[in-house]
Image: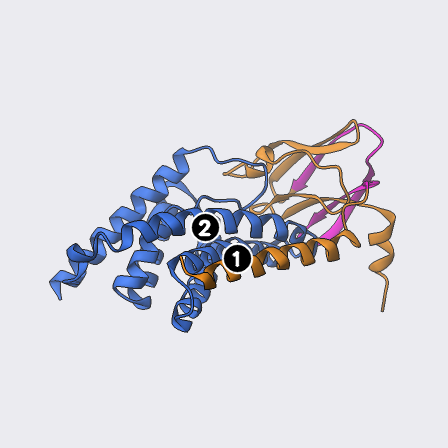
């Protein structure tokens, strides 16, 4: 392990901190709404405060979304790998649950991200 | 020529076994895309003892076979994109000759995760999943570092076996 390696790893650490600080301005506030995107398009919005059970349906496939106690998670899905079901529940703005085979993204938004989307 | 093919097959088989072991270990943090990357051990050795073309060949073969055995078309696509990303940067870092195999492994681990996340963002057409980039960079750094240290220890010991390649 040469000295250059340690410098390299040090630079990466610094880069991580920089990225995380930049991201705190956009993400990581407490979430308010749950947005469901299919194929990149916003289909449904729910409040994080209201307990819900919602079946996301996509061309013969499904993801069962549960909103409970201010958290959202996927309980069941039709995709072959079911990675979305294994993902931890989300509640912070910016966090998301992803089902790649079904092209479904469930993400948490706060008021700040919604305003950003309208800048033209 | 046959010696090359024999060693390529041997390395590929080893990489497949490492991938299989990785699948057996429940490395689940609930975050999409975090991997142990054990097969990179072979890819690193191939990169240093054979060359970039051979490393690409072994990696692609391993991904396709593991994909057919344990995954699906989607997983092959994502693994391949992560691998191409990672091999590209590993090759660059190695070419500068300024860093040891540990850094090559680190950049490989990081870029594999980042590459997969970027492709995933394209597929679901959402930029918000890029929120996970810092965590994936950290995970890639740690796994790459540990694997790099292990590979570094082994690399010179097996030089006598592989010098004929």
Classify the position of the C terminus of chain B by image quarter.
Answer: bottom left
Residues under numbered marks 1 and 2 in contact, where contact means CB atoms less than 8 Å apart: yes
Q: Colour of chain B?
A: blue
Q: Colour of chain A?
A: orange
Residue B133 position in % (x across, y down): 62, 53
Residue topped by disc 2: B145
Q: Is residue B120 left or right of residue B4?
A: right
Viewer-closest of A110 and A78? A110
Q: CA distance from mark 1 to mark 2?
A: 9 Å
The residue at 30%/63% (across/down) is: B48
Residue A17 position in % (x across, y down): 67, 54
Rendered position, B162 above or below A38: below
Mark number for residue B44?
none
User: Are discs 1 and 2 located on one and the same chain?
Assistant: no
The residue at 84%/59% (across/down) is: A116
Q: Which residues are magenta?
A: A30-57
Q: Is residue B122 visible?
A: yes
In the displayed orientation, state which residue is furthest to the front. A3
> Is B60 part of what is drawn in magenta?
no
Give SS at disc 1.
helix
Colouring mode (rainbow / by chain / secondary structure / one colour): by chain
Mark number for residue A9?
1
Q: Is residue B13 left or right of residue A114?
A: left
Give SS at disc 2.
helix
């Amino acid at each position: 392990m040469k000295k250059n390696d340690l410098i390299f790893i040090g630079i990466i650490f610094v880069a991580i901190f920089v990225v995380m600080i930049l991201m705190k301005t956009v993400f990581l506030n407490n979430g308010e709404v749950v947005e469901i995107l299919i194929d990149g398009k916003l289909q449904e919005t729910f409040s994080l405060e209201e307990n819900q059970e919602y079946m996301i349906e996509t061309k013969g496939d499904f993801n069962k979304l549960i909103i409970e106690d201010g958290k959202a998670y996927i309980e069941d899905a039709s995709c072959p790998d079911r990675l979305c079901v294994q993902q931890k529940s989300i509640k912070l703005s910016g966090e998301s649950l992803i089902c790649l085979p079904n092209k479904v993204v469930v993400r948490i938004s706060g008021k700040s991200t919604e305003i950003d989307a309208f800048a033209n | 020529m046959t010696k090359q093919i024999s060693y390529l097959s041997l390395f590929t088989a080893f990489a497949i076994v490492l991938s299989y072991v990785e699948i057996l270990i429940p490395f689940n943090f609930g975050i999409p895309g975090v991997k142990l990357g054990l097969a990179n051990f072979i890819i690193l050795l191939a990169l240093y003892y054979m060359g970039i073309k051979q490393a690409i060949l072994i990696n692609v073969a391993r991904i396709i076979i593991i994909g057919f055995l344990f995954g699906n078309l989607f997983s092959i696509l994502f693994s391949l994109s992560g691998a191409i990303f990672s091999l590209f940067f590993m090759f660059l870092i190695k070419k500068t000759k300024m860093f040891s195999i540990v850094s090559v492994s680190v950049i490989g681990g990081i870029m594999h995760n980042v590459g997969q996340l970027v492709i995933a963002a394209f597929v679901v057409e959402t930029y918000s999943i890029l929120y996970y980039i810092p965590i994936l960079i950290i995970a890639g750094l740690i796994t790459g570092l540990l694997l790099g240290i292990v590979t570094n220890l082994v690399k010179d010991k097996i030089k006598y076996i592989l010098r004929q390649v």
